[in-house]
Image: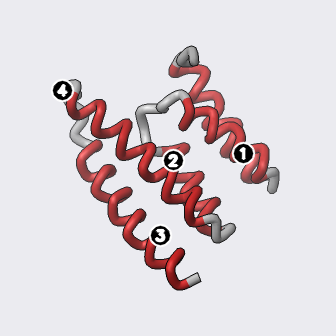
């Protein structure tokens, strides 16, 4: 699968955000999921999907995208990135997974 440019992925995030504002959540999901598939290197599409899927009680999907962000963060950290935001974001997503697992088990 070919990776898309960061401009393309940023455009998808913006489009997804605008679609959400207009109530077109399914179309927004498509934009964000494309960025997850292309391993977007910041948390925005993962976070939006996590929230949408949690609201829809689609906990397995929320867990999947949270794990996808952790995988991207780990790869960047292993590669020696200088981004100081990745460790706290990765920790936040680990905590989300724990809470999502609990919600899934309650449901």
Instruction: Pick whichever of labels 4 and 2 is earlier in the sequence.
Output: 2
- Give the mark nearer the N terminus: 1 vs 3: 1
Residue most toward the front?
A: 105
Residue that mark 2 sits on: 46
- Give whichever of discs 4 and 1 has the lower sequence position: 1
Q: CA distance from mark 4 to mark 1?
A: 32 Å
- Point out residue 32 in the picture as x, y percentages from the top left corner: 62, 41
Q: Are marks 2 and 1 in contact (CB under 8 Å)?
A: no
Q: Position of residue 106 (x, y in %)?
A: 53, 84
Judged from the image, the secondary structure of the residue bearing numbered disc 1 is helix
Q: CA distance from mark 4 to mark 2?
A: 22 Å
What is the number of the mark on residue 100? 3
Kindly check if marks 4 and 1 are in contact, taking CB atoms under 8 A apart as contact.
Answer: no
Q: Nearer the viewer, residue 83 or 75?
A: 75
The x, y position of residue 7, in whole percent, is: 56, 20
Residue that label 4 marks: 80
- Please tell me which residue is depicted at 61% across the width and 21% down the height of the picture: 8
Q: Residue at x 47, y 70 (%)?
A: 100
Badge 2 crowding class, 10 Å Cα cut-off, few under 14, some 14 to 19, many 20 or more, is many
Q: Nearer the viewer, mark 2 or mark 3?
A: 3
Judging by the rendered image, the residue that carries numbered circle 1 is 28
Say if 3 sits above or below 38 in the image: above
What residue is rendered at 42% in x and 38% in y? 42
Q: Residues within 10 Å of mark 1 (few under 14, many from 20)?
A: many
């Amino acid at each position: 699968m070919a990776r898309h440019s960061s401009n393309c992925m940023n455009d998808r995030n913006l489009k997804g955000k605008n679609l959400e504002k207009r109530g077109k959540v399914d179309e927004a999901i498509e934009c964000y999921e494309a960025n997850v598939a292309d391993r977007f290197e910041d948390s925005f599409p993962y976070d939006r999907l996590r929230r949408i899927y949690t609201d829809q009680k689609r906990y397995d999907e929320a867990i999947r995208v949270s794990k996808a962000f952790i995988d991207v963060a780990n790869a960047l950290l292993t590669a020696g990135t200088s981004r100081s935001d990745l460790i706290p974001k990765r920790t936040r997503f680990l905590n989300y997974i724990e809470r999502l697992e609990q919600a899934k088990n309650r449901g």
